Image: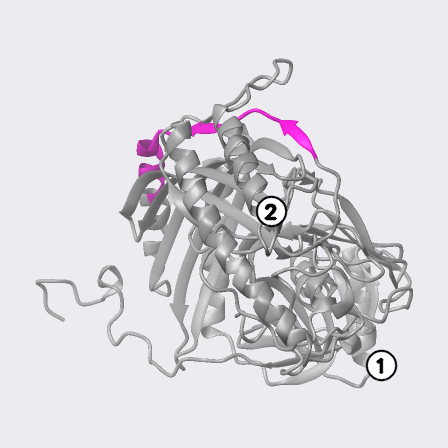
Amino acid sequence: MINVNRGGLIHFFGGLSLLAGLALPLAPKAQANTPDIPAKRSPLLASLQAELDRSMKVLSAQDIPAYYLGYTVTDTQRVDVSGSNGALLNSNETRNRWLEVSVRTGSHQLDDTHKVGERQMLSGSPGVSVPVDDDAEILRRAAWLETDKQYRAAEEALIKIKTGKEVKVETVEGNAPDFSREQPHVYIGPQVSIAVDRAPWEAKVRAYTKVFRDSAAIINSIVTFSAQAQNVLQATSEGTQLQYGQIRYRLELFIQGKAPDGMDIDRYYNFDWVNPKEAPDDKAVYAEEAALRKELEGLVAAPINDPTVGPALLTGRAAAVFFHEVFGHRAEGHRQKDVTEGQTFSKKVDEKILPDFLSIADDATMKKLGGEDLLGYYPFDDEGVPAQRVTLVDRGVLKNFEMSRSPLVDFPSSNGHGRRQLGFTPVSRQGNLIVQSSKTMSNAKLRTKLIDLIKEQGKVYGLLIDDIAGGFTFTGRGQPQAFQVQPLVVYRVFADGRPDELVRGVDIVGTPLAALTKIVATGDTPEVFNGYCGAESGSVPVAAASPAILISELEVQKKESSTDRPPILPPPAHDVVKTGGGL
């Protein structure tokens, strides 16, 4: 993905199920300090600061000086329970700690991270696993060794960069500083933990997946429950000291089928929550299972849609992914700076890129929208900068980018969007991408307007895209500036009033500058898509929210398909020839 600069919004693989008659398991308890009691500072933070001070004093005096040093310890406690087709796949609980050391040599203007010419691939991972015991001396020893390793790598990199700058042409943005100057932040929040009784969840995933066996069209089903508590300790040579934690729960439903022509049919749904009291009940899960089964059975028998260009209506979840892929990745700050990137929006600040009734913000401070938890919330980004709301597009006009601490000429500061998966280096990434519209109408009126467009264009039908798996986009200069969004449930809507027809094998394709100008109206109810986005700095949790959107011209192509036929025999429970019997 890094080599071709692909960014994709993807589901965290798993499944969700609902069991009638089984009592809801005891809610996992989130253990943390109450808000009115000051949080207790971890002794490990003082240990990190002591080793940081010792190292910085020496490394800043070297011939090639270190001007910045940062330590981050991430302590992760995780519970996973998975079932398939009525049986338990796995049930486990793990805990680990990861130490990341960031050493920068040179200066804020030019340091060892500077990109000269083509994209430089980072060598190795900026971190190491450390013991989970609260042993200050052991942690200091690990930090000492990792600091030495990272300083030597940064020292060597800066020498090569200074040499390369003498023979490579620099762009304007390439002359921007390599690291922004930010105010230090001190925040000591409560540490969090989870206490999950796995046995009830084991019973649930068995029961939830067993329900799917009632359908002969479902080849496989997986349900996964996961719970995670993650605590972060961070200290930097600038004076930042942070201590905070986050808890997340997720329940996922995943089923697979196969059409007669070999095309794989997948249906997926996930529940996300933060408060253990808000876990989905059995009624909600079973209802979603019934919908998934009905849709998969319909898709297996549905015709394949031919490539077309015409009017399309995307429901809110589908529209949210559309904006994430088509706009969001191209508004990430580091893509404006890298000469290998397509830089679609780099020179379009204060220019109109969307219809004037649309505005877009990335607000990582939002915990909920319409009662639904947002996965893209975080208190501080992975460079120690507080999360912020950033207005990216105001009434159709581009205003800003999602910024990490890699500044641009006209955007010298971070706005709290430097993010990464553990083991990767932070870059600017999306958090909660929120689309707002001043030209709204009810979804019913939006559908009527879709039919009007179909008739005006002389088409037989348009498309209603009702659910979506995810997608990806190419942002690199070496590839076409294209995107692909992968719908799961698509209907043909006919101009002559015939009932909608479910179709399969549809992928949305296009180029961003053209596609964004074709939006003509929106619905009045925002919907949320929670997922995990994969790009240069790994997979990070994100959310996107949008009302339904009507697009005057949308191109779709045939989905890539397997040629493997469905199983020769039906599932054993659905075979008309019973075991041990005759015809």
Above or below 72: residue 178? below
Question: Magenta segment: does it hold 202?
Answer: yes
Which residue in the structure is indicated by mark 2? 61
Question: Magenta segment: does it hold 432?
Answer: no
Q: Could you tell me the amino acid type at mark 2?
A: Ala
Residue 412 picture quarter: bottom right
Q: Residue at x 41, y 35 (%)?
A: 139
Q: How is the image coloured?
A: one colour
Residue 521 position, x and y percent, is 84, 64
Which residue in the structure is indicated by mark 1? 456
Residue 349 picture quarter: bottom right
Q: Residue at x 58, y 17 (%)?
A: 34
Q: Check residue 8 in the rendering and tell me which mark sits there, or answer none.
A: none
Residue 179 position, x and y percent, is 70, 54
Residue 240 position, x and y percent, is 65, 35
Task: Tell me the SS state at disc 2.
Answer: loop
Asked whether residue 233 appears in the rendered view, the answer is no
